[in-house]
Image (tube, rainbow, N blue to C red):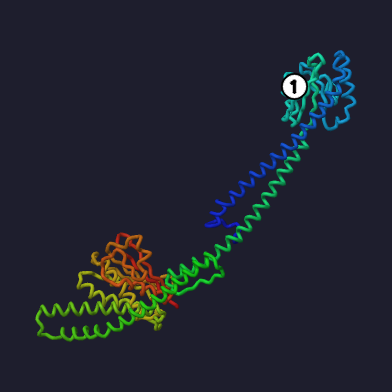
C-alpha cells in the first residue's frame, strides 16, 4: 500500500520537519506548559486566599474568647466545629500548641494528629501558614492553612487549621492541560497540512525539473520543462530549457559536421585503399617500398573503419540507424567473424580461440551485417586493450531462449570505477589504446535495437569479459 505523501519523510520534507516543525512543536509545548502552570498558580492562589480569609474571619470571631479559661475556650471550639456549615467541602481543626488534635468538624477525635509542617510554622512565626502537598497520613493531595490562636497576653493557645482536598482543582488543571495539548495537536496538524501543500508546490516542479535534467544528461537534448511558476523555480526551469536548446543546437551542428567530414573523407580513403592494393600487386616493388605500402594500406583501412564508426554514430544520434532484419544463422556469422579476424590477430602474435560446442543454436531474426560489426568491434577492442595477454577466447551458447556470445581477453582488465562508463560515447578512460571512443556506444545501440544487452565486466583471474545476449525471437 502506498504511503500518502504527507507521511513520507525524506529530502526537503525531512529537513523542514527537523528545522521548522520541531521548533514550532517545541514552542507550542512551552506554551502548553506555561498555560498549565499559570492556571495552576491561579487556582491554587485563589484557593489559598479563600482559606486564609476564612481563617482570619474565624480568628477575629474567637478573639473575644481569648481571655477565657482554656476549658471555656475548648468548649467554644467544640461548639463552633459542630455548627460549621461548610464541613462537606473542607475540614476545620483546632490543634493544641503541642500539635495534638483537639477537635475537628469531622468529629471530636477523628484520626491522629496532623503532622504537616505549616502547623509548627504558624506556632513559631505567629502568622498564618499554608501547605500544599500530600497528607502524610492519607496520601491525599490537600491544601491546609494554619492560623495561630493567641491569648491577649501574647501566648499561643493553639492553632486553627482549615484543610481541603485539591482533587477538584487538580482535575481542572489536568483539563486545562488536555485542552492545551489538543489545541497544540490541532495547530501542528494545520501546520503539517499547510506545509505539505507548500512543500508539494516546490517539490513537484523540482521533481519534474530533476527528471527532465536527467533525460538531458542521458542525451535527450532539446527537452523542455513546462512550469506555471514565475518565481525562482520558473527561472531555474527557463535556464535549463535554454541550456537544453543550446546543447541540442550544438549537438546538431556537431553531428552535421562529423557527417559531412566523414563523407568527405570516404572518397580520398577509397582512392588510397584502391591504389595501395594496386601498387602492392606489383611484383617488381623492392622490399622497403612494399613494407611502406603495407603500412599505408593498413593505416588507410584503420582510418576507413574510424570514418564508418563516425557515420554510424551520426546515424545513431539522428535516429537514422535502421536494421535489415532477416532470419540468420547467427552461429555461422560468428564463426566466420572469428576465423577471419583470427588470422589478422595471429600476425600480431595474439591467439583467438573459438570454443566450439555441439549445442543446437536456432536461427534468429537479426541484421547480420550489424551484428558482424558488433562482433568485429568487440574483438578489436579485446586486441587493443587486452592484447598483452596474447589470447582471446570466444564462445556462443543458447541459454534461456537467448543466444549468448562471450568474448574474453587476458589483459589487465578495466578499473572498477570505469566499468559503468566504458559504453558512453567518446569515453576512453585510462586506456592508452588508439580509437575514437564511440565503437562500444554504437555496438550497445545496435544490440539494444535487437532487444538484447551488452555487458562488460572483469573476468575471474584477470582480463575483460564482454557478454552479448540476443533474444531468439524479436
Q: Quadrant of the N terminus?
A: bottom right
Q: Depth check: give the residue in front, 12 or 336.
A: 12
Residue at (81, 23) in percent of width and height: 160
Q: Classify 10 Å Cα crowding around label 1: few (below 14), some (14-19), many (20 and above).
A: many
Q: Residue at x 56, y 70 (%)?
A: 228
Q: Is residue 89 left or right of residue 236?
A: right
Q: Position of residue 361 (x, y in %)?
A: 38, 76
Name the residue nearer the viewer: 32 or 324. 32
Above or below residue 321? Residue 53 is above
Q: Total number of numbered labels?
A: 1
Is 166 positioned to the left or the right of 380 in the image? right
Which of the 4 quarters of the picture holds residue 199? Answer: bottom right
Q: Give residue 419's position: percent from left, percent from top.
A: 36, 63
Seen at 30% across and 81% down, the residue is 262
Position of the C terminus by quadrant: bottom left
Residue 120: x and y, percent? Answer: 73, 20
Q: Is residue 434 left or right of residue 100?
A: left
Is residue 283 placed above or below 130 in the rendered structure?
A: below
Query: What residue is rendered at 41% in x and 79% in y?
Result: 319
> Circle 1 sits in a helix, a strand or a loop, which is it?
helix
The residue that label 1 is drawn on is 122
Residue 237 position within the rendered picture, expressed as x and y whole percent measured from the top left? 50, 68
- Left or right position of 236 against 392: right
Nearer to me, 66 or 396:
66
Closer to the camera, 363 or 352? Answer: 352
Amino acid at each position: 500500500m502506498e504511503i500518502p505523501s504527507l507521511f513520507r519523510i525524506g529530502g526537503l520534507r525531512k529537513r523542514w520537519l527537523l528545522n521548522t516543525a520541531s521548533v514550532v512543536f517545541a514552542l507550542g509545548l512551552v506554551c502548553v506548559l506555561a498555560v498549565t502552570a499559570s492556571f495552576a498558580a491561579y487556582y491554587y492562589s485563589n484557593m489559598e486566599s479563600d482559606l486564609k480569609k476564612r481563617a482570619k474571619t474565624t480568628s477575629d470571631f474567637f478573639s473575644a474568647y481569648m481571655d477565657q479559661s482554656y476549658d471555656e475556650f475548648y468548649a467554644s471550639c467544640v461548639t463552633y466545629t459542630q455548627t460549621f456549615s461548610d464541613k462537606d467541602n473542607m475540614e476545620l481543626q483546632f490543634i493544641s500548641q503541642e500539635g495534638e488534635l483537639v477537635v475537628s468538624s469531622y468529629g471530636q477525635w477523628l484520626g491522629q494528629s496532623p503532622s504537616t509542617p505549616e502547623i509548627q510554622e504558624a506556632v513559631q512565626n505567629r502568622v498564618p501558614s499554608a501547605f500544599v502537598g500530600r497528607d502524610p497520613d492519607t496520601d491525599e493531595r490537600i491544601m491546609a492553612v494554619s492560623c495561630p490562636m493567641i491569648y491577649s497576653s501574647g501566648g499561643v493557645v493553639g492553632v486553627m487549621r482549615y484543610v481541603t482536598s485539591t482533587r477538584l482543582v487538580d482535575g481542572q488543571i489536568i483539563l486545562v492541560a488536555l485542552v492545551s495539548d489538543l489545541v497544540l495537536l490541532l495547530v501542528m496538524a494545520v501546520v503539517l497540512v499547510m506545509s505539505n501543500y507548500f512543500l508539494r508546490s516546490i517539490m513537484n516542479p523540482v521533481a519534474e525539473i530533476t527528471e527532465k535534467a536527467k533525460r538531458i544528461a542521458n542525451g535527450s537534448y532539446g527537452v523542455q520543462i513546462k512550469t506555471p511558476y514565475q518565481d525562482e523555480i520558473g527561472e531555474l526551469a527557463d535556464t535549463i530549457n535554454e541550456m537544453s536548446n543550446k546543447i541540442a543546437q550544438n549537438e546538431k551542428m556537431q553531428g552535421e559536421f562529423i557527417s559531412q567530414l566523414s563523407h568527405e573523407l570516404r572518397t580520398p580513403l577509397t582512392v588510397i585503399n584502391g591504389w595501395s592494393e594496386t601498387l602492392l600487386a606489383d611484383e617488381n616493388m623492392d622490399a622497403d617500398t612494399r613494407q611502406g605500402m603495407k603500412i599505408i594500406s593498413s593505416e588507410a583501412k584503420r582510418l576507413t573503419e574510424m570514418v564508418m564508426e563516425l557515420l554510424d554514430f551520426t546515424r545513431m544520434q539522428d535516429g537514422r540507424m535502421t536494421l535489415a532484419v532477416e532470419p540468420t544463422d547467427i552461429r555461422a556469422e560468428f564463426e566466420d567473424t572469428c576465423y577471419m579476424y583470427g588470422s589478422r590477430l595471429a600476425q600480431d602474435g595474439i591467439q583467438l580461440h573459438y570454443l566450439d560446442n555441439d549445442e543446437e543454436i536456432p536461427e534468429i531474426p537479426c541484421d547480420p551485417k550489424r551484428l558482424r560489426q558488433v562482433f568485429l568491434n568487440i574483438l578489436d577492442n579485446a586486441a587493443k586493450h587486452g592484447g598483452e595477454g596474447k589470447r582471446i577466447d570466444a564462445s556462443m551458447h543458447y541459454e534461456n531462449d537467448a543466444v549468448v556470445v562471450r568474448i574474453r581477453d587476458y589483459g589487465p582488465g578495466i578499473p572498477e570505477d570505469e566499468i559503468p562508463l566504458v559504453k558512453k560515447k567518446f569515453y576512453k578512460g585510462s586506456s592508452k589504446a588508439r580509437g575514437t571512443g564511440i565503437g562500444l556506444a554504437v555496438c550497445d545501440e545496435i544490440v539494444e535495437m535487437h532487444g538484447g544487452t551488452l555487458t562488460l565486466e572483469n573476468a575471474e583471474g584477470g582480463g575483460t569479459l564482454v557478454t552479448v545476449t540476443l533474444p531468439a525471437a524479436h
